[in-house]
Image: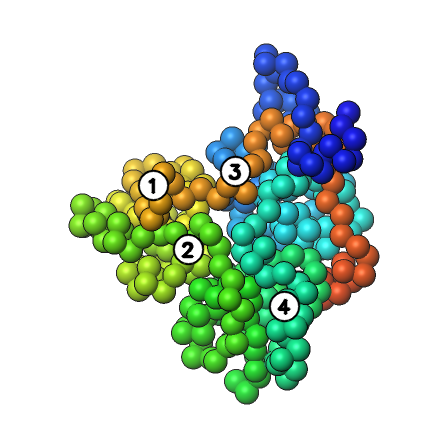
Amino acid sequence: MDTLEELNRRGFVEESIDPTLDLFDEIEKLKKEKNAIVLAHYYQEPDIQDIADYIGDSLGLSQEAAKTEADVIVFAGVHFMAETAKILSPEKTVLLPDVKAGCSLADSCPPHLFKKFKEKYPDHLVITYVNCTAELKAMSDIVCTSTNAVQIVESLPKEQKIIFGPDKNLGAWVAKKTGRDLVLWNGACMVHEIFSREKITKLKERHPGAKFIAHPECEEAVLQMADYIGSTTGLLNYAIKSDAKEFIVATESGIIHQMEKACPGKTFIPAPPNNNCACNDCPYMKRNTLEKLYLCLKNGTPEVTVPADIIAAARKPIERMLEISASLGL
């Protein structure tokens, strides 16, 4: 068994696995044995999505983490998501297959710098996008996701001054949709920032019947081209309901697995980024693998913990988000 130091350095349990093992069967057995649930984000690899008890976006995953009866939550996602689960269910064990599954957006907003930024606007209410650290949530008044950001801003009095962080692209989109003047933190997601307007234009020319759908974390120049802008779940629902047969999808490519499962007669094309590898995978999301998930559940580690004072402070803005979402039927 790894020492804690080795585990933190590597990020995951390293152990040889019998190649004849059916990992799907083994994970199912371990889930029953340990009363464990696997929550997976849409951006995980297809095998993990297929073994998960629940697949969703940040809002759905938060709602699921808050209500689960399981003793153990295995979070197949990134670190801030596992932290959110721990904040909502502090008495439960929360495991993350690879603790180095971080987030470029969360990294773009260090709490000590945000604290100074917040101090400049003492009369502003702080809304933070869920894609941030537990420390940042603890400094917030309300947490939001891309599913409910517009509605949460609209639920506040028009005269209420608001800081929105850490995603400047989502914040700008929310400001445009609501007509509110938001003070934005200058953060962004590396995956959603790399889509190439020029390459998408060429792709649209080759697929004139395709609908171009985009996540609001994309840059304004990309969003201007979109037929539909929405959260990951919103994009999936749009694809299911639309009469179109082809879709160009501007978000992390993991969602395409669910789109193809839900819409077998439709074609989904990942929007091209402006890099040479032509891929728009999140390197952090893809750190989790079926093997790491199996070993994590088998060994009960790596575990994600959050200090009690941070849990107490961060829980309030998350619960406020869940309350507002429930009242709006989201």
Looking at the figure, which quarter contains the N terminus? Answer: top right
Q: Is residue 165 visible?
A: yes
Q: Amino acid at mark 3?
A: Lys
| Quarter location, residue 4 | top right
Cα distance in 3D space between marks 4 and 2:
21 Å
> Do the residues under discs 4 and 1 have CB atoms within 8 angstroms?
no
> Do the residues under discs 2 and 3 have CB atoms within 8 angstroms?
no
Scheme of image coloration:
rainbow
Residue 269 located left or right of residue 71: left
Residue 40 sits above or below residue 18 on the image: below
Residue at image location 57% in from the left, 75% down from the top: 163
Callout in the foreground (1, 3): 1
Sort mark 2 into few (<14), some (14-19) or many (20+) by Cα contacts within 10 Å.
some
Sort mark 4 into few (<14), some (14-19) or many (20+) by Cα contacts within 10 Å.
some
Callout in the foreground (2, 3): 2
Mark seen at residue 193: 2
Q: Position of residue 128 (x, y in %)?
A: 59, 66
Q: Position of residue 51 (x, y in %)?
A: 57, 32
Identify the residue at the far top of this view: 20
Q: Mark 1 or mark 3: which comes first in sequence?
A: 1
Cα distance in 3D space between marks 1 and 3:
19 Å
Mark seen at residue 114: 4
Residue behind mark 1 = 276
Q: Mark 4 or mark 3: which comes first in sequence?
A: 4
